[in-house]
Amino acid sequence: MNRKEKKERKEKLNNFMDLKGSRFTDYEVERLESIVNDRDRLNGLSTSRHRSYKTFDSEDTYRVDENNRYTFQSDDSGISIVEDYEKRYDDGQTETYHIKHNTARDILNLISELFNK
C-alpha cells in the first residue's frame, strides 16, 4: 500500500486503539484492521497462564505461584487487553496488579502470543 493509503487506514484504526506514533508494516496494519473487524467476536475472550517456582533469600526458600489472566475487551472507549496478575508466596503474602493494554503495538503483540489470532 502507498503512504497515503496507509495513513488513511491508520487514522481509522486510531478510533479504536492508541497508535502512539508507532511505525507499522503493511502486514501489521492489515492485522490491526482484522482485529478491529473481529472485535465483537473477540470481546470477552480470555486466557490464563500459571507459573509456579521456588525462590530463596538469605533466610529461607519460598514457593511462588503466579497467575496471569488476559481478557480482550471492546467497548465505547476502544479495544484493549486487560491483564490481571496475582503472585502468591507460601508465607501468605500476595501481590496483585491490573494493567489495561490499549496501544496498538501491545494489542498486536499480545493477541498473537496469547490468542493465536
Image: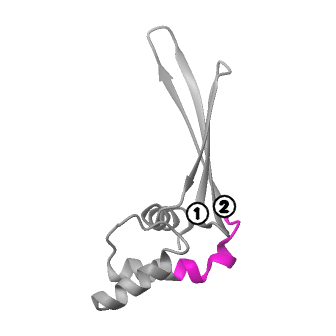
Instruction: Determine which quarter of the picture holds residue 58.
Output: top left
Instruction: Determine which quarter of the picture holds residue 114.
Output: bottom right
State which region is magenta.
Answer: 34-46
Quadrant of the rendering where the N terminus is positioned: bottom left
Q: Position of residue 18 (x, y in %)?
A: 48, 66
Q: Position of residue 96 (x, y in %)?
A: 62, 36
Three-letter code for the amino acid on which mark 1 is drawn: Ser
**Left or right of residue 7: residue 87:** right
Q: Nearer the viewer, residue 33 or 11?
A: 11
Q: Which residue is mark 2?
A: 46
**Left or right of residue 57: residue 41:** right
**In the rendered structure, does residue 15 fall within the stretch colored magenta?**
no
Residue at 50 percent of width and 64 percent of height: 107
Residue at 52 percent of width and 82 percent of height: 34
Q: Nearer the viewer, mark 1 or mark 2?
A: 1
Q: Which residue is mark 1?
A: 80
Q: Nearer the viewer, residue 1 or 83?
A: 1
Residue at 59 percent of width and 83 percent of height: 37
**Left or right of residue 78: residue 108:** left
**Left or right of residue 64: residue 105:** left
